[in-house]
Image (spheres, rainbow, N blue to C red):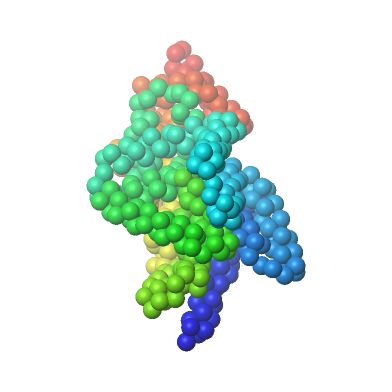
Amino acid sequence: MSGDYVYVLKISVVSFFFISSLIFFESVFLHAKLFSRGNVDINTGVNGIFFAALIPFLIGIYCYVGEYRWKSLTVGTLFIVIWLVIDSQSRTAIISTLLSCLMFILIRTNLRLKKRNWKLWLKVVIVSGFIVSILICIFFIYRINTNSVSGRLLIYKISLKILGDNPLLGVGMGNFRKYYNLYQADYFNGKTFGAENLLARNIYYAFNDVLQFTIEMGLLRFIPLFLFFLFGVWKISHLIKISTNPILLGTASALLCLILCSQFSYPLHILSIQVLSLFFLSNIIFLSWRFGQSSRNNITQSVVMILVAGILFIKITYESILIYRCQIMWEKAALQSLNGNFSIAKKIYATCYDNLKEDPEFLLNYGMELAIDGDYKQSLNILTYAGFKVSDSELSLYTAFCNEHLKKYSEAEINYLRAVNMVPSSFTYKHYLLCFYINHGRTENIISTAKAISEQPIKVQSVDVYQIKKHAMILLNKIKQ
């Protein structure tokens, strides 16, 4: 009977890893094909985190296997994964990998030498060295790209404002992207243009999964979850001490890598990494029964937890298959729109609407295509529905565009201003606002907007920006004359 358990659990655990890998490569290539026509590098930031978590896990496998051929295969795989992480240029992934591997080395060394009765001062030195390493890494992150760090600090500042307004119950799961850009627009509304304005852009993640989950769940729901997490950490650390299994330690280090990455990015919101996390958790559950005490309670707990993970895995996989099929149709609709066949595109969009109506990217794209085709009323309906799921400067711009053509001028101005304040460094949004004021002969607003454009520093040089600034200066000169 125990052999059957081992076989079933092994198959379940390994399947998580292969499916997570398939989802990862499918999502990368599909995303590149859909939105960037193949011009997306596989190893961008979050994708690098996927590979980063595999490094300590592979080190654990290397320490466990005995045969030379398996060690050679593990080393070869490890070098490929390390290269992919480095090539991703993700500072978060690289530093989290170093720290998780350092933890693996320290704990494994301590376990192997625990019989030597280490002195207290030596343990203090090791722990202090680990803390100093973390501080050095944080300093290293800041010094490499100060603008990136300053941008994250701005995100945290606005995110904490959202949490302050909704501390107990939160804003609801998945609603961070609905509220953040609205708060950012309020933050910059009426504010003198400064260095922070150049950093602001459309944000859909808090770049700290713990902070984002707290904002969405509220303290009443997040604190019990966090306590359960701490209990899990304690159980895993106790299991590592009694089992001394390097695969278990490598798996725990891989989870630590993901946790560290989640403090500066959003890996826990990526489907492939969610399934990879299920693989690591299931691996720990399997090893806790395989190498721990084999009592009936332990076996029952392991099987139940594997089943829970399996149900989550099946749910995630099923949903991803449905979405994938609809995204293929979405791609066909986008290509038809690109070629000017709006009548065909609208039929395809309508076909996949029911399955993708919860996807704000789809709704935004659908609404924009309708607006370009001149169907302003239907476009406004779609964009309004999208606004219940996400806030975005392009969403506000096209909502304003539709309202203006439907002669709802007050709503149009509100949305033009919202787009401007969401991304205050954008000259394009200010240009559309200026054109709106010109069309309605609002001289005072024309002067203030044209002056703001002419005085605004340029973030990225381009011909379009030069033409917009030139147009604003010509307007100011004409009004003065």
Q: Which residue is pictured at 75% across the width and 69% down the height?
A: 69
Tell me: 56 left or right of 12.
right
Q: Position of residue 234 (x, y in %)?
A: 40, 56
Q: Residue at x 40, y 73 (%)?
A: 298
> Relative to 478, is 386 on the left or the right?
left
Could you say which is closer to the camera, residue 240 or residue 418? Answer: 240
Residue drawn at the location 50% of the way across and 77% of the way down: 9
Q: Is residue 385 visible?
A: no
Residue at (46%, 45%) from the top-left corner?
A: 263
When asked about the image quadrant of residue 194, the answer is top left
Q: So how many labels did they put on this image? A: 0
- Residue 367, quarter of the rendered image: bottom left
Tell me where residue 54 appears, x and y as whole percent: 60, 58
Q: Position of residue 279 (x, y in %)?
A: 51, 66
Q: Position of residue 215 (x, y in %)?
A: 33, 47
One can see residue 262 in this view: yes
101 on left or right of 448: right
In depth, the one of 325 and 254 nearer the eye is 254
